[in-house]
Image (cartoon, rainbow, N blue to C red):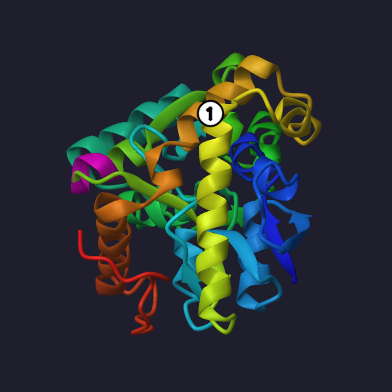
Amino acid sequence: MRLKIGFSPCPNDTFIFDALIHHKVDTLGLEFDVQYEDVETLNHKAFKGELDITKLSYHAFAYATEEYELLDAGSALGFGVGPLLITKDPAIAERLRRIIEEGDLLLESDKSLKIGIPGKYTTANFLLGLALPALHEKHEVLFSEIENALLEGSIDIGLIIHENRFTYAQKGLYKIVDLGDYWEKTTGCPIPLGGIVVKRNLDQSVKLKINNLIRESVEFAFANPKSGLEYIRSHAQEMEEEVMYKHIDLYVNKYSVDLAGEGRAAIQQMFDKAVSRGIIPNSGKNLFLTDRNE
């Protein structure tokens, strides 16, 4: 049986899926055709139902629950892993930091600031809406180009994800806030960034097999962290090995093996909070593939 699977070329995803797609674990007769895309492209593919299994943002999942349900394995959640809001103007950084921390009001001039976001349906943009709801001048920019857009002056603020959190300071850019830290302080939960979903219309036995295989793939990667080095490097945009593994350490953890009760509670709280604020629709669908009482 061949299945279409989509995930990003970022080190955390290639680390997770290396053993699965290269048959380092027994795939039990399943074959996987891989599509490598940035997360916002994957979000839109999910909206169209184009893939059998896909990585997507948790924000985007709210708009794809009719077609997909969430696997227990493969997710990116954690503490200290959130998207960063950055700028090249230290005065802007200081002012917005104070607004977020102390609840000051935005100046009229702040409301016209141009913000580069990695996608409308990214979890990063969802968190930005919680922290600074009055900022509306948003422009979608490929996540890897946001730093350059700031340096060139085409945007005033950048919302960065993935490996860019390790490179912005070297380019003379300033952090305004870690939106993951903001979420953690507000809720006490790990921040749900991205999950792996599967088509609801697949046979239940196939979906459970996929879930188990992804878990085994993550476990293999943890047990053999250098096994997929060349594969990871080939998709990592000339990233240094040290930075690749910092990226992996940041986003791949116990929640990637199994969401368990804590991970599920964080995801449910994010959905409940977003529904209550009118940020996402309430679909009424069960989010999770498996039923568990933990």
For residue 199, which quarter of the picture? Answer: bottom right
Position in image of residue 157 (x %, y %): 53, 39
Is the stretch drawn in magenta largely helix, strand or loop?
A: helix
- Could you say where residue 196 lies in the image, as x and y percent from the top left? 53, 59
Kind of residue indicated by mark 1:
Ala
Q: Is residue 21 above or below residue 247?
A: below
Q: Front-most of 219 and 140?
A: 219
Q: Is residue 185 magenta?
A: yes
Q: What residue span does the magenta drawing correspond to?
A: 183-187
Horizontal arrangement in the rendering, residue 106 relative to residue 27 (left or right): left
**Front one among 46 and 181:** 46
Res 147 quadrant in image: top right
Residue found at x 45% / y 45%:
256
* Residue 107 visible at all: no
The local secondary structure at tag 1 comes to: helix
The number of callouts visible is 1
- Left or right: where does residue 157 sit relative to residue 244? left
Task: State the image coordinates of residue 59 (x, y, percent, origin top left).
Answer: 45, 62
- Residue occupying image coordinates x 48% and y 23%: 174
- Residue 52, how many percent across, how many down? 66, 71
Q: Is residue 225 above or below residue 220?
A: above
